[in-house]
Amino acid sequence: MVQLSHNTALTLPGRSLRILICAILGFSSGLPLFVFLNLIPAWASDGGLDVKAIGLLTLLQLPYVGKPLWAPFLDWFSIAKVGRRRTWMMILPILLFILLSLFGLFNPQDNSIILLGLLLSFVSASLDIVIDAYRRELLPDNELGLGNTVYVNMYKIAGLVPGGLALYLADQLIPWSGVFMVVAAFMLPCIALGWFMREPKLNYLPPRTLQDAFLIPLKEFFTRKGIAAGLLFVLFIFCYKLGDALATSLATKFYLDMGYSKTDIAKVAKVVALWAGVAGGFVGGFAMLKISINRALWIFGIIQLAVIPLFAWLSMQFHPTLGQLAIVVGGEAFGVGLGTAAFVACIAQNTHPAYTAAQLALLTSLASLPRTLVSSYAGFMVKALGYTEFFWICT
């Protein structure tokens, strides 16, 4: 195995350009996911689907969970003269543009949208894999914090297109075919980037066979860290955001139970959460230009812990106000924005650039497990304990 330092990118654009690339990649990566979360349910509702059928459409997102299954193939296959990352960055954004444009041409009650939706989800998840790998190779270690922060924040901001602009256009009686075309057009910067970007020149040999691409990343990870330290790191990845994931898994239900209306939640909770999270991410990213990622994990982790009791405080209010809701939501989002900035940078730092796609896909999937696993138990805990005790357990 070729040894190398973590500063592997020998020919990199300047910092400003690297950060701009991270912004484009983050927006392009988040856009398709928010199409599933915000736009497709509204489109399906207009098409006459009932709530049960719309709920089942969430299963179209299953390919996002299975990324580790084919990430090694994306690490291995390339068109020689194009480059390992550029091969997929030239193909996948164009496919996404086409698939997003096609969606609005179908009737939601047509069974063919299941196949189209799964294909869209698969291509989007594949682009996530390639973008994660390219971003790790693009950024030197001292920019991982800032670069990944910009990426994560632009990922969140992308939700304003399917969840805001597109719904507004649909409300203006623009046909759904036109709405989906507008959303698809936001993939054009990523398409342009794929054709004009430079392939990072790295001093390692990529996997030579498909078998190597599947087996060596795991072997390399535990060889580099050791079995005990590797397992502890995996446990750390699972646990770092566990408390917050549990506390926020029933957030909307909690706000409703506290007497807030859906309009209150939309106006205060969602808007404040978005921009407070973005602010926390940027503060964390710039801070990591001055302090190490490991130190940031401790500092931001403590802040992330300290904001969870705000939920317990709100649960004890008899007549909670919108201002109190904004304090809780904004504080939690800001603290989690800080923690996420360090957490994502930490995951990237602990991958080997020779196997970036496979290792990042595995670790990021592991990081998403807490929200998936604990959310199914949160309701039982609230029912047995009440909200106040539940939030103290989360803390």
Image (cartoon, rainbow, N blue to C red):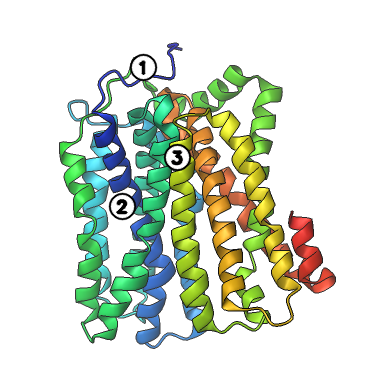
Q: Which residue is mark 3?
A: 285
Name the mark nearer the viewer: 2 or 3.
3
Q: Is residue 318 visible?
A: yes
Using residue 376 as the reference point, say whether residue 341 is left or right of it.
Answer: left
| Residue 66 % position (x, y) | 50, 49
Residue located at (45% from left, 52% from top): 279
* Picture quadrant of residue 239: top right
Using residue 384 as the reference point, say whether residue 184 is left or right of it.
Answer: left
- Above or below: residue 45 compared with residue 187: below
Circle 3: element type: helix
Name the mark nearer the viewer: 2 or 1.
2
What amino acid does circle 1 point to? Leu
Name the mark nearer the viewer: 3 or 1.
3
Q: Which residue is mark 1?
A: 205
State the separation of the CA atoms marked 2 and 1: 29 Å
What amino acid does circle 3 point to? Gly
| Residue 22 % position (x, y) | 32, 41
* Picture quadrant of residue 181: bottom left
State the separation of the CA atoms marked 2 and 3: 20 Å
Q: Which residue is mark 2?
A: 28
Residue located at (64% from left, 52% from top): 370
Label 3 neighbour load within 10 Å: few <14, some 14-19, many 20+: many
State the separation of the CA atoms marked 3 and 1: 31 Å
